[in-house]
Structure formats: structure tokens, C-alpha cells
Amino acid sequence: MNTLFLYTMSGLALFAIGLHGLIRSSHLLRKILAANLMSSGVFLIMIVGACGTDQVMIDPVPHAMVLTGIVVSVSTTAVALVLVCLVQETTNRALLWQKRKRGQGGRTDA
Amino acid sequence: MPDTAFWAVCLVVVPLFFALICFVRSDQAAVLGLLAAGLNALAALAMTVFFVRSGPLRYAIGGWQAPLGINFSIDGLSVLLVAMTAVTGLSVSMYARGYFSLRIGSAGEINRHGHQRAFFWPVWLLLWGALNGLFLSADLFNVYVTLEIIGLSAVVLTALSGKPAARLAAMRYLLVSLLGSCSYLFGVALLYRSYGILDMAALARLISPAPLMWASLALLTTGLLLKTALFPLHFWLPPAHANALAPVSAILSGLVVKASFYLMLRLWGDIFAQVLPFAAYVLLGVLGCGAVLWGAVQALLQKRLKMLIAYSTVAQLGYLFIALPLIRLDPGSSAWEAVILLIMSHACAKSAMFMAAGSIFLKAGHDRIDDLAGIKEVLPISSFAFVLAGVSLMGFPPSGGFVGKWLLLGVSLAGGEWWWGVMLVIGSLLAAGYVYRVASRLLVFKVTFFSRRQSIPPVMEWSAVLLALLALLLGLLAGYPLGLLEAGSPFPLHACREVMP
Amino acid sequence: MNWGGLLLVMILLSSLVPGLIIFALPEKSNRPRTFLNLGGAFLKLLLILVMIIGIYKGRHFAVRWQLLPGIELALNSDPLAALFSTLSTVLWLLTTLYAVGYLEQSPNRRQFFGYFSICVTVTVGIALAGNLITFLLFYELLTLTTYPLVTHRGTREALAAGRVYLAYTLSGGAVLLVAVAWLQVLAGPVDFGGQPVLASVAATHELQLIVIFFMFIAGLGVKAALVPLHGWLPRAMVAPAPVSALLHAVAVVKAGVFGIVRIVHDVYGIGFAAGLNLLLPLSILASVSIIYGSLCALREDDLKKRLAYSTISQLSYIVLGVSVAGPLAAIGGLVHLVHQGLMKITLFFCAGNLAETLGVHRISEMNGIARRMPLTMAAFSVGALGMIGFPPMAGFVSKWYLGMGALATGKMWVVAILAVSTVLNAAYFLPILIGAWFKPQECTWSEQVVAVRLETRWMLLVPPLVTAFLVVTVGLLANAQISPLAWVKLIVGREFGP
């Protein structure tokens, strides 16, 4: 039970650290890493859930879900990385809040 | 013998399959995409017909039962939203066919254009398949997967425009979407931990107040609110919707935000309705009021047409959230009907508006609202489409928006909480204000108007105007779609109303 | 759908379809457009005649279309509906003729005539509306379809006027929407001319009913230009003359007044409204509008604006007649619905002629003008004298019944208001007439119509002469069997009858 508790807590901690990183860091690469950290935390908590209270029967469903989740997260990361490259390419910096250009007042496209 | 389930499966498989083919044969993408759109609409029609005949249905794909298999649950709400997606999607596809057949400007731009055309179709079909999957899914984890696909493909579509502002907006959209899905997944994990099941119908029976349940609800809701862009979490929406290409804006504003709102409706209107206190609904309603006011005021202040329309989406989403407390308040089913009408008419009207705005942008070469006077002379049909769509957004009779507003007004007055109704009316007056800002320029007669020599294909103008007309006539024909709702499963809240004090 | 219902729908379609076709026609095709316009107008008139004969024979036409349970669109032909739709149709026909002549050289006629036709459809829709929701539908649509007409000229001033117009009417529409919804929540769907349903809820919800009544008046009062809500009307006079003539003397403002009549007669019922003490505030409001409108008219030098303020004043006669709560006064008020329409449209046609032919917009420029345009000024004089209430013009009949009604119910102050108003009417109309007929010409006019035998184009001249003729005829033949007065007596007889 104690190990499970520890796992859960670590999952929560990962989630919290990731959340903090996602919101606070300015570089886009860091934000993406932080988002990955968040989902890892969630996966950890899900896997812990597979281990029922009696610790005899292992529930296979969370494993399936986490596997799906990992696939989703890998593809999301891939898209995100490409997008960071694109942003870098057009603005010369991989930051979300460009100086004085916040997208809002800028030109819109048809 | 094909039945409801067959067509439902088609609705997910066909777009995904065609997305693949479009990706491989990018030279034929437009034809294939239109073919897929047509097939999709046919499948949606067929499913609706069979649904009317045989009623609601649960279906385990390949015979694999939950929790490991994928289950579909097809009820009136799902059918209506799938149909809405099919109609809107079909007209946007037709519009996109015209839009991407245009060649603009210099050689470099033409190159970019070919790139956009090659990628729009596969990603849009992927998005469409995911939307259908979301509306038909029976369990919350499958919903997560479809939500993630929707989010990713929406981001890719946003970035397609290639402008720095669009790329930045797409990046912000992606991060918000990631955060939202993560939060949602966390909520799902906690739910599974407490109940060992993720099927929505089963959960609705099992839910009971417990700390873990509250935590999971909070996480699910936060994730969905981020994706639905409810004020004050709307910051990402206007730049993303305004900077995307016109067909993409239409899809994002008309359909994508509805997906996450649909889930809110399932969660708050059905699954958790038994345990949630009224105050929670009031909180969402108050945020909705905030959205209506803030979105409208921002829309009034914008200088650019597409930005204005994007802020109007923020405001209109607020409307949907104001309806949530009224659903709870309503002893009958009219608040439900109203929400669904509002969703559908907003989907049609807003898509039509973005499509018309796209044509105007291409013709005029800019979308500065103040300089649009006289565009009617060169683009009469698109201007007309814009004004028609605007009339629907204002909730003028006989549009679907009007009937929705009318029903909600009735519920709020009958329930003694008239302020929600008054808020709706104020919202539509504000909407009239920002629609007027544009319409007064579009309607005015001016002999000379400087425009590019670009000719807009008729299909772009007509698809917009037809969609706008549909939004306007939805009110007159409201009985038919809503009858579908009654023919389907009973209203979710009816089941739990006896439990509620 | 039954045949009677089909007739009502046809009446609406007979101007809607030409309107839509006109939008599809190219700008240059003038002949087909004129043909469509006039053909539609004649067809509509014919259909209305069929309807009136039907009503006279005691038939009842109705059609319903359910959107959702509790939301039903209904068209219904009661005598009041027939009165208002006949008025709109006859005047539409004349105004179309006038507008064809008036806009002969101006650009963007396609849009003008398209909206013009749709606008008349909506007005007749208001007349035929069988319940509150249908009324609301057409009332709101009227706002939308008249906006492009008000801003037709596209000048900065026109756009500003349009903005004010929309701000007023949309807010009014919103208030009306809430009122209708609230009433429906309390009493269920309210059909015009059906069983009075409010009496049953009065015991428990008296205060709500009173509040709802005043919300109705506020919502409808915007279009009816009751005094604190009249600000849009004088500004909207920047519209072309046919628009001012039809819309701001007949369609829009009458839609508001007609709505008030419906609310008082068919929704609340006169007896019930009087029982709740709702009618006295309404008649005070109307009296204030009558006096205030006339006083403002005195100060205006711009002819169309003076006419606009006069409209504010005259419209309130109708409201006053309805709110005095006696059969005679009600006859006076309702018949003024028709009489005021005829007289005011004559005046506006004439004002348009002066502006179009000689470029005269101000009253100070009108001295001696009758020698140049005798026929126009003759028509104008008939309209103006009618407004003042000279016998045997139409206006006299209305005022006579209003006064008699006030005496019959013992409301002496109403008679006083009528007297003061008549003096004021004379004070702002007579100087115009005296100047035009008897004073020498003072300033030079810029002749804008050249080489015509008549004083102006015939299409501009015929409509005001016809309406002026009608003003005299309905006054002279007020007691004939087919006069508006007889019809109004029929309506009022049913309302006050046993």
C-alpha cells in the first residue's frame, strides 16, 4: 500500500511540476517538455490504479489506456516540435509571447 | 443489411480512410475530399433515417464489449450533432474546393498555396472523423482519444496559413489543448479509479458524492472549459480563429468548439447532474454571462472583420453556458431543446459568416471593417450571406437562435430566475451592435470600390449563403430536428429528476 | 392547408416573391422591375378584396404553423387585420407608382424596390398576425427590412439616422420580446381575438400583468413614436420621400400603433385593462405626445421634419382613442388609423414633389410656390386642412368621434387636449398654406425637372392627387356602407358588443 501511495504522490508531483513548467517557462521547448511531464504523471497514476486494493488481480484496462495515451502523447509531441520549428523559422525565436506582437493586432489571413 | 450501427461506423471509418488516401494522392486531394464529404453526408442522412425508424442504440464494434472494446451509443443528441457536422462540413468542403482552386499573387505564394491545398484535405477529414467519433462514443476514454485527434488536427489546420501570427496562434492553441487534454485524462483516470468503469451511461447510474469524484469532475471540467474557451479561458481562441484560413476558421468556430461543449452537456446535463449542486451551474452561467459581455464588447472594439467574428464566437459560447443553469431549472425539456437549437444554428451561422468573410477578404485584399463600404457591389451574395448569418446570431426571428432564445427566456421567467433571460436579451442586443458595425458597411451603396481582380468562384459565395439561410430557417423547421431528440433516448435529466429535491 | 389559409399566405407571397425576384434582376432592367412591382401590388389588392368580401360574408380565414409546442405562427383575418392590410396595400400601390417616378434617375434602385416589397410583405404580416409570437416575428423583421431603406442614400447623415433608428427599434423589440415571453409564461400562448385568457391569472399575478402591459407599451411605443421614445422619427426623415411617405407615415409607425391597439383590444381587453387602471396612464402618455409633437412641429423649418413631428402628434390620437375606453372614442381612434395614413401620405408625397421638382426643402422657401405647382399644393392643402380637422375632410370625422367619445365617458380633459391640439395643428399648417398660396415668391428655386407639360412628372403627381381625393371622399362618404368608418364601427361593435 505504501509503494502505491508513493507512486500516486510521485504522479501528482510530476503533474504539478509539469503544470508549473507549462505555465511559467517561456521557451516553447521547455513548455512541451513540461506537458510531457504532466502526461507522464497522469500515466503513472493510471497504472497505479490498475493494481487493485487486494493486489492480486491486475486490471488490464489501465494498461491499454496508458498505451493509447503514450501513442497520443508521442504524436502530440511530434506535432508540437514541428510547430516550434515553424515558429522559430518565421519569428527567429521560439517564444510564445513575442515582443509587442501578440498576434491580436497583427494581420489576419483570409 | 445495413442499419444504424453500420452507418455510424461508416461515419468514422470513411473520413479516416479518405484522409489517408488524400494524404497519399495529394494531387487528387480536392476531388477525394469532396467525395468523402458527400459520402459522409449520405451516411449521416442514412443513419438519421434508420435512427428515426429504430430508435436509440448501443453498439459494440466487432463484438468487443466494454471496457476493452469500443462502444458506440447513438441517441438523439448524437444524431443531431453528427447531422449538424455533416451539413456544415459539406458546405465548408464545397467552399474549400473553391477556395483552394484560387491562385493568389506571386510564385512563392503559389507554392505555399499548393502546400496548403495538399494538407488541408487530409487533416480536415481526420478532424471530421474524430468529431463523428466523439459524438458517437459511449465511453469517456474513447472521447479522450477523439478529443486529442480533434485538437491536433485543429492546430495543424490553424498553422496551415503560414503567417507568423497564425503559427503563434496555433502554438498557443496547441499548448492550451495539451493542457486541456491532460487535465481531462487525469479526470478520467480518477473516475476509473473510483468506479472501475468509464461508460457514460453506466457512470450516470453509479455516481455518488465522494472526494475523488469531485476532484475528477473538477479536472474534467477544467479541461473541457479550456477547450471550449469559456471566458476567462478564451484568450487563445480569437487569434487562432481569426488568423486561420477561411475554411479553417469556419470549421474551428462552427464545429470544433462544439465538440467539447457537447461533452460538457453530457457531463453536467446527465452524468454528474444528480450530485452537482445548483450553485455550480450558476457559477458556469455567470461565467457565460461574462463571456457574452466580454466577447461582445471586444467584438465591438475590433478593427478587423475576422477578429470581430472570432470574438463573437466567444460571446455565443457564453450563451450556451448560460443555458446550463436553465437546463437544471427547467422541469420540462425546453431548455435542452434550446441549447441544441443554439448549437446548431450557431454552427451554421458562424461557419457561413467566416466563409463570407473569407470571400470578402480575398476580393478586397484586406479585412479592415472601416474600409469595406461598397463591397456589396462586387460581392453581393457574400455580403448578403454575412448579413443573414448576422441576423441569426442576433437571434432574430425566425432563426434557430431566436427559438432557442425564446425557449430559454420562457424557462428563466417561469423558473423565477429572470436575470438569465434578461442577460440573453442584452447579449443579443450587443450582438446586434457588432453585426451592425459590419452590416452597415456591407449594405451601404458606394459606386466605386477598390478590389482585386481576383474573381471569387460562385461555389464559395453560394455555399455561404445557403448555410446562412439554413441557420435562418432552422427556427421555422425546429420541430423536425427536435422531434428527433424526443424520438431518441429520453432526456438525460428526466431519469434523475425524481432523485433531486 | 385550407383555402382560406392559402389566401392569407398568397397575400403575403404576392409582394414577397416580386421582392425576391427584383433582387435577382440586374440593376438595368427597369421595365420588368416596374411590372413586377405594380403587378404584385394589384394582385395583392385583388386578394385583399377577396378576403374582405369573405369577411363581410362572415367567413373566417386562418392558417397555423407549429414550430414547437407552445410556439406557433398564426395568420388570422379579423376585421381589424383587414382594415390595416387594406390600408397598407392601397398605399403601397400608390407609393410604388410614386417611387418609380421619384427614383427615375437615381442609382441602386434594385435594392430599393427589393426591400420596399419585402417591407410591405412584413407590414401586411403584422396586420394579419394571429397571435403575439407572429406579431413579434413580423415586428422585428420590419426593423430589419426598413433599415436599408432609411439609409438608402448612404450619406453620412443617412447612416447616422439609420444607427439611431436601429438602436431605438432593436431595444424596443427586445423589451417586446421579454414582454411576450413573460405573458406566455403566465397565461400560455395568446391568440388575438380568441377567448380572453388574462382574467383567469389576474387574481394571482396582477402586478406582473401591469408591468407586462407597460413593457408592451414601451416596446411598441418606440415604433409608434410615443413621446419619450420618438427620437428616431425626425432623424429618419433623411430617407427618400417615398420611404418617408409609406414607412414613416404608415408602415413602421402604424405597426407600433396597431400593436398597441392589439394589446389593448385583443390581449388585455378594454374592460380588463380599464379594471387594472392601465388606460389612464396610457391616455396621459398619448396626450403628452399630442401636445409635445405639435409644439416641436411649430419650431421646425424643415418641411419633412415638421411633418414628422406632426406624425408623432397625430399617431397619439389613435392611442388616445383606444385608451379612452368608450366605443365612440375607439371608433375615432381606429378610423384615424386609416385617415391619418391617407392624409399624411398625401403631405409626404407633396413634400417629395417640392423637393424633387424645385429643390425646396424648407418652409421658408415655400412662399408663392402654389403658383408654380398648383396641383401639388392643392393636394397638400387638402391634407393639411384634414389634419387640422376641417369638415368635411377625413380628419374631421376622426376628431368628431374622439371628442364625442370623450364626452360620452365624461373625460372633459380629453376634449380640452383635442381643442388645444387643433389650435396647434392650425398654427403649424396654416402659415404654410397662406405663404404658398397668397405670398409672392421670395427665393429662386432650382428647377430640376425640365421639359414636362405638367408641373412635374405625372408619376409624381398622380399619387398625391389620388390620396387627396380619397381624403375628401372618406370624409364626405363617411356614412356610406363601404367607408372605413363603417368598417371600424363593425370592429368596435364586436369589441364592445354583448
Image (tube, coloured by chain):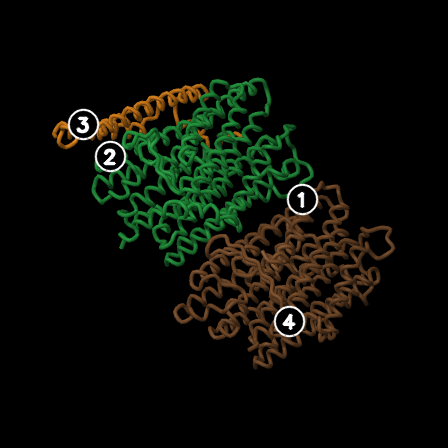
Chain colours: A orange, B green, C brown
Residue C490 x %, y %: 63, 73
Pointer 4 indicates a residue of which chain?
C
Amino acid tagged 2:
Tyr
Task: Judge by depth and name the residue closer to the eye, B351 or C187.
Answer: C187
Task: Judge by depth and name the residue closer to the eye, A89 or B267.
Answer: B267
Q: Is residue B20 above or below residue C328?
A: above
Amino acid tagged 1:
Phe
Location of mark 4 (residue)? C488
Question: Is mark 1 in CB contact (under 8 Å) with mark 3?
Answer: no
Residue B309 x %, y %: 50, 39
Can residue C243 be seen by looking at this rendering? yes
Say if labels 1 and 2 share a chain: no
Q: Is residue A93 above or below residue B347?
A: above
Location of mark 3 (residue)? A58
What kind of element bears circle 3? Answer: loop
Cα–Cα gap, marks 1 and 2: 60 Å
| Mark 2 surroundings: few (<14), some (14-19) or many (≥20) residues within 10 A | many
